[in-house]
Image (tube, rainbow, N blue to C red):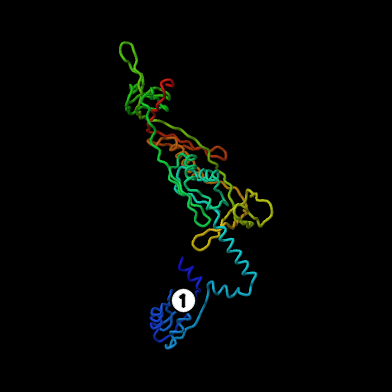
């Protein structure tokens, strides 16, 4: 990218050379430090290549004693553009103003890019930046990295490190999230382990306290599984921190209604395109009022940011909004597809109800039509850890 920019500023000339000994031209370029690139052979005696305006003049000087015929095919670059504009003073003035605005715009922040955050929402990070005075249109030189980091780390407890690097007019926010330690067990707290739901106990692991159930026992929700109260002798009681795992077979039943009729969109009947231009925080619409999308319309919005060579983004974004109007008609979907959709939804609901240690042992589905809907029912047997700790007062 850097070489292309340099070649553009020097002027890029495309030449064709025809000679009985074309290798002599290549040797002359190398001997006299004439830059050349993108060599393409047309035949055994003819080839094309790119060079600079100064390189072309030098090559014609040193190749005078050869039989080579050199022809210019195309010229482009900044010198050619300036020669074309040398008598167009308005265009030159406009170009100068544009370059000044371009250089001035790179002193401000017009876009943000956040990386490294998995659990902390990007919106929270940008909102915290805005509270520190860093928003669209802020000067990049006004950022005090140390002060900004100290304030934002206080507002974002789940972030351990943060840096803001400005490239062009885009602020890149790099985030390192904090690794939270597992919850600390308060061993001095007196608790019972109770059942989180009904089930048939298959295994009991009492780490502390007295087990009140054994494998094969049927329990109900809220029943004490591991007690934190034991006989201390001489008519007294000893309070403990009841801990442990109790595995049990559990049963779930979920139902959902799946529509058998669907509204489908046909071929497009009309298309409308709206253009707008975002200049920083300001939007300029090139269409009249009214942006409400009709129910039978598809709205597709594309944002095309203007960038310069090297990846420098300008504070200008072209917004292209297309609204495609379609004819809507209703149709009846196959019962089998509706059943598959219902089973997938219920399976997802079941997996969400289980802890990460739980597993599904068996599932059974049933379905029945009810008017324009299909009632899908899931009955499942699972194996999961149902013991939860509660304070003795709540047990």
Q: How would you rate the neighbour count of disc 1 (Cα within 10 Å): few for under 14, some for 14-19, many for 20 or more?
A: many
Q: Would residue 304 be visible to someone looking at this image?
A: no
191 sits to left or right of 53: left
Q: Position of residue 201 (x, y in %)?
A: 35, 27
Q: Which residue sits at x=44%, y=87%?
A: 64
Residue in front for this viewpoint, 257 or 93? 93
In the rendering, at what x and y percent does residue 48 appear? 45, 78
The picture places residue 29, in percent across and down from the top left corner, at: 41, 79
Going by the image, does 317 lie left or right of 179? right
Viewer-side residue, 292 vs 332:
292
Name the residue carrying label 1.
51
Q: Report the side of 69 relative to 202 (left or right).
A: right
* 360 relative to 169, above or below: above
- Looking at the picture, tell me which residue is in the foreground, 9 or 50: 9
Q: Is residue 151 above or below residue 395?
A: below
Q: Residue at x 31, y 11 (%)?
A: 234
Extreme left residue here? 233
- Residue 126 appears in the figure: yes
Q: Along the line of sight, which residue is nearer the eye, 130 or 120?
A: 130
């Amino acid at each position: 990218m850097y070489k292309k920019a340099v070649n553009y500023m020097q002027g890029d000339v495309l030449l064709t050379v025809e000679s009985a000994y074309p290798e002599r031209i290549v040797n002359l370029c190398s001997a006299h430090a004439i830059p050349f690139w993108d060599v393409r052979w047309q035949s055994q005696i003819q080839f094309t290549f790119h060079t600079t305006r100064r390189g072309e003049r030098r090559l014609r000087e040193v190749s005078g004693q050869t039989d080579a015929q050199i022809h210019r095919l195309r010229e482009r670059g900044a010198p050619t553009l300036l020669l074309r504009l040398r008598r167009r003073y308005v265009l030159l003035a406009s170009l100068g103003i544009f370059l000044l605005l371009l250089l001035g715009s790179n002193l401000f922040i017009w876009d943000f890019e956040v990386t490294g955050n998995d659990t902390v929402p990007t919106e929270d990070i940008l909102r915290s930046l805005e509270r520190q005075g860093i928003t669209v249109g802020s000067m990049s030189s006004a950022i005090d990295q140390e002060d900004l980091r100290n304030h934002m780390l206080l507002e974002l407890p789940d972030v351990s490190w943060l840096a803001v690097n400005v490239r062009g007019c885009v602020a890149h926010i790099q985030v390192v999230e904090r690794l939270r330690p597992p919850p600390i067990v308060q061993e001095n707290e007196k608790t019972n382990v109770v059942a989180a739901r009904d089930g048939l106990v298959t295994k009991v692991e009492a780490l502390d306290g007295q087990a009140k159930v054994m494998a094969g026992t049927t329990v109900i929700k809220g029943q004490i599984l591991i007690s934190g109260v034991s006989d201390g002798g001489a008519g007294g009681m000893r309070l403990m921190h009841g801990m442990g795992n109790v595995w049990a077979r559990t049963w779930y039943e979920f139902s959902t209604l799946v529509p058998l009729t669907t509204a489908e969109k046909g071929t497009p009947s009309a298309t409308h395109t709206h253009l707008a231009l975002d200049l920083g925080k300001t939007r300029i619409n090139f269409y009249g009022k009214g942006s409400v999308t009709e129910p039978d319309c598809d709205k597709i919005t594309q944002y095309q940011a203007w960038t310069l060579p090297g990846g420098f983004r300008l504070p200008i974004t072209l917004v292209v909004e297309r609204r495609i109007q379609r004819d809507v008609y209703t149709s009846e979907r196959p019962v089998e597809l509706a059943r598959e959709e219902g089973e997938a939804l219920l399976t997802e609901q079941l997996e969400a109800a289980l802890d990460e240690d739980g597993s599904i042992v068996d599932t059974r589905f049933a379905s029945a039509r009810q008017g324009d809907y299909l009632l899908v029912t899931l009955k499942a047997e699972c194996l999961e850890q149902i013991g939860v700790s509660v304070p003795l007062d709540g047990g």
